[in-house]
Image (cartoon, rainbow, N blue to C red):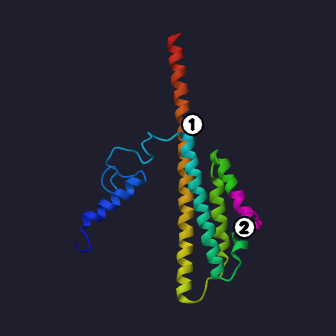
Amino acid sequence: EEGGGSGDVEDAMEQFVSQFGGGGGSIGGGGGGESCDGGKEGMTESEKMEYREKSLEYFVQCAVSFSGLLASMCGVDGDVLTDLSNNNDSDQKIAAAASAAAASTGGGGGIHYSTMVSTLRTRVSNLTPPSKSPEKESFEDIKEMLDEIQEAVDTAEEAEEGLRTLGVMKANEIKKHEAKMNGEQE
């Protein structure tokens, strides 16, 4: 058989996926009734928080990498531009605005990730893009990716805040219900 059939390729892919704990059904289908975490039913809240935190950390690492790349495209030292431990005055204004936003929403879990990405984007906005066409286009594309990372981090933080608010509302309703039930039983 020359080239093999497409069924052989699918079988090989299915075997590959199943070796890593996936599959159980068709490729991408997950039709085997197993969960993605190796058969465990659900994750604990602390595991979910840990994965959310790691995800946000990875977004920031990507933003740092892209910012360093943009800096090097412009002939600027990427290590200096991406150093988030040394904030200048404009960076402190960004951090203060983020702190105020966190205080006004009563939360702040993860708000520092948004601040970090925002700081990098502000620094990148001060760079002079390359004048040559292919490099200029690449520069703009990477800047757009930074914008998308900012949006993803902000969306994740907003969702987290919404879940936190919903949890508080639920706890309050449970307390009201318990108080009502205790009042009726006496």
Instruction: Please name whichever residue, 7 or 64, is drawn nearer the observer in this view of the structure.
Output: 7
Instruction: Please name whichever residue, 28 or 99, is drawn nearer the observer in this view of the structure.
Output: 28
User: Which element is circle 2 on?
Assistant: loop
Residue 42, position in %: x, y?
A: 46, 40
Task: Residue under label 2, please give it.
Answer: 83
Residue 58, position in %: x, y?
A: 58, 60
- Residue sitting at x 62%, y 59%: 114
Q: Amino acid at mark 2?
A: Asp
Residue 14, position in %: x, y?
A: 33, 57
Query: Left or right of 123: which side holds 137?
Result: left
Query: Left or right of 32: which side holds 180?
Result: right
Task: Residue under label 1, please give it.
Answer: 168
Q: Magenta stretch?
A: 83-97
Query: Left or right of 48: which side holds 71?
Result: right
Circle 1 Cα neighbour tier, 10 Å, few/some/many (<14 / 14–19 / ≥20): few
**Quadrant location of the N terminus in the rendered image:** bottom left
Instruction: Please name whichever residue, 49 or 133, is drawn nearer the observer in this view of the structure.
Output: 49
Question: Please, is residue 16 above or below residue 79 in the view?
Answer: above
Q: Amino acid at mark 1?
A: Val
